[in-house]
């Protein structure tokens, strides 16, 4: 597995406990529209991603992330910046 | 044409659905007459007020009212000007002096509302490239201050010291850090572990802002708030407060010991680009603050009221926001909005006003009946209030 694959599968595992609707996750799955997450769920989920990867995802940054793929890219970029 | 109001359709439908059940609109109550800090006439009925944040009951204090009338006569009804132009009268200086004495701090800056105080200080102090690290349950005015500024905004789990520390350690080297906390969180009435959180913030080189809106006047030895009660007020860089709760009028402020603090008067837009408070308002505020300096008996009675209401509501079988009373706010947790609205209406019919609070103002999607006590509630009134909760609970099947 490449680094990106690892990050992707880690994020899938983090989505799982919040995926109450049991939606099948694809790279283009959208958090707000497809998973129907409200802002509180998003904040809880972001906190778990931050802790998993030891990064900070500010609200400004999180607002630009709509899909699973975009989150994987953002996490990898934030990881690289450290 | 796209109707710009279509974004509100869900909320409009929810509201219509609720009102179609025949319930009184909980967000449209009119007080026809106000008799005292604890009693008003609503819908022609005498109503005990248990949702006003008028913690110290200063709104009808004879000295406060006299000061306001005098200022109205001597200085007119309004300043029609910004604090930095024609809007600073002697009264504005006097109320800032009263705040400096009350908090024993070097600087005080008065805003036209508490909302503007948070909006102005946070958006101005934290700039581009800086980080604001805030409790996720922070008040709307804190979030709006963040949204108005250009800093990176990082929330952490409510009252979680470890979550705060982890985020502080992840901030890039050299970036400015502002940690924003509240003394009392107004929805559940719980207090923050400020001692630990401020220690962690300082150890990681952050400046700390604490909003003490709901603690001023009665928490801490001198009523300076939760930071004073926990012995860490000297480590707080900025305290934000309001005149619209214990002080009993309207306005907001920031007090600080920062040696460059006064420059904010020139760079803080919500301070500069709005009219200053009317002379009568600053006169009532200054008089009230000076009286709050010395009101231990009232503070003690307020705590007694809070303890009695908390214990009594528990005994009746209600679920409360905190296991122990931590402030003058007691939040009764309702199972859903419909039950909450029915209970709210039943209480109003009994002659009791409380706040119905719902998302997004509340944490975790909760519906709350929020009660805030007043030092002017007599012990008999508190018993009367418990009787009303018992009756309303029976009428709606809540208990």
Image: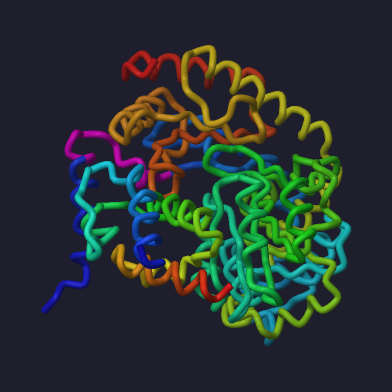
B43 shown above or below B28: above
Furthest-left residue in view?
B1
**How many numbered marks are there?**
0
**Residue at the image position 39 percent from the left and 50 percent from the top:** A14
B215 shown above or below A76: above
* Visible residue check, residue B277: no
Of helix, strand and loop, which mostly describes the magenta segment?
Answer: loop
Front position in the image: A29 or B382: A29
Q: Quadrant of residue B343?
A: top left
**Residue at the image position 24 percent from the left and 46 percent from the top:** B15
Q: Position of residue B296 (x, y in %)?
A: 83, 35
Which quadrant: the N terminus of chain B?
Answer: bottom left
Q: Which residues are magenta?
A: B18-30
* Visible residue check, residue B57: yes
B68 shown above or below B41: below
Front position in the image: B5 or B54: B5
Front position in the image: B219 or A50: A50
């Amino acid at each position: 597995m490449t680094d990106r694959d690892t990050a992707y599968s880690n994020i899938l595992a983090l989505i799982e406990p919040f995926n109450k609707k049991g939606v099948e996750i694809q790279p283009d799955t959208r958090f707000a529209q497809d998973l129907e997450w409200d802002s509180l769920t998003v904040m809880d989920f972001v906190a778990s991603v931050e802790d998993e990867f030891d990064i900070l995802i500010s609200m400004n940054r999180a607002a630009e992330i709509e899909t699973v793929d975009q989150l994987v890219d953002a996490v990898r970029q934030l990881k690289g910046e450290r | 044409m796209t109707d710009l109001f279509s974004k509100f359709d869900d909320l409009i439908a929810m509201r219509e659905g609720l009102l179609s059940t025949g319930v009184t609109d909980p967000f449209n109550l009119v007080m026809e007459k106000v008799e005292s800090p604890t009693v008003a006439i609503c819908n022609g009925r005498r109503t005990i007020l248990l949702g006003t944040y008028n913690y110290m009951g200063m709104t009808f204090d004879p000295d406060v009212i006299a000061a306001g009338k005098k200022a109205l006569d001597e200085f007119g009804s309004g300043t029609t000007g910004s604090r930095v132009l024609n809007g600073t009268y002697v009264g504005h200086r006097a109320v800032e002096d009263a705040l400096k004495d009350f908090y024993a701090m070097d600087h005080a800056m008065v805003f036209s509302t508490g909302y503007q105080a948070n909006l102005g200080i946070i958006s101005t102090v934290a700039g581009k490239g800086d980080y604001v690290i805030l409790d996720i349950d922070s008040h709307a005015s804190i979030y709006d201050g963040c949204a108005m500024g250009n800093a990176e905004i990082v929330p952490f789990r409510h009252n979680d010291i470890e979550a705060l520390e982890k985020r502080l350690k992840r901030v890039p080297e050299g970036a400015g850090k502002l940690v924003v906390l509240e003394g009392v969180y107004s929805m559940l009435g719980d207090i923050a572990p400020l001692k630990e959180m401020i220690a962690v913030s300082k150890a990681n080189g952050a400046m700390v802002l604490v909003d003490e809106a709901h603690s001023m006047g009665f928490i801490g030895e001198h009523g300076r708030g939760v930071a004073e009660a926990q012995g860490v007020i000297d480590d707080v860089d900025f305290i934000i407060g309001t005149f619209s709760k214990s002080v009993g009028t309207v306005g907001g402020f920031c007090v600080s010991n920062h040696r460059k603090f006064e420059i904010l008067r020139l760079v803080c837009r919500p301070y500069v680009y709005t009219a200053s408070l009317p002379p009568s308002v600053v006169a009532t505020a200054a008089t009230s603050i000076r009286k709050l300096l010395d009101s231990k008996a009232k503070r003690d009675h307020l705590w007694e009221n809070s303890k009695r209401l908390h214990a009594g509501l528990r005994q009746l079988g209600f679920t409360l926001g905190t296991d122990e009373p931590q402030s003058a706010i007691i939040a009764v947790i309702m199972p859903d909005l419909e039950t909450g609205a029915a209970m709210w209406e039943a209480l109003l019919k009994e002659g009791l006003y409380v706040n119905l609070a719902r998302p997004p103002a509340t944490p975790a999607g909760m519906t709350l009946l929020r009660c805030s006590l007043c030092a002017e509630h007599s012990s008999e009134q508190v018993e009367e209030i418990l009787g009303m909760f018992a009756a309303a609970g029976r009428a709606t099947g809540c208990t």
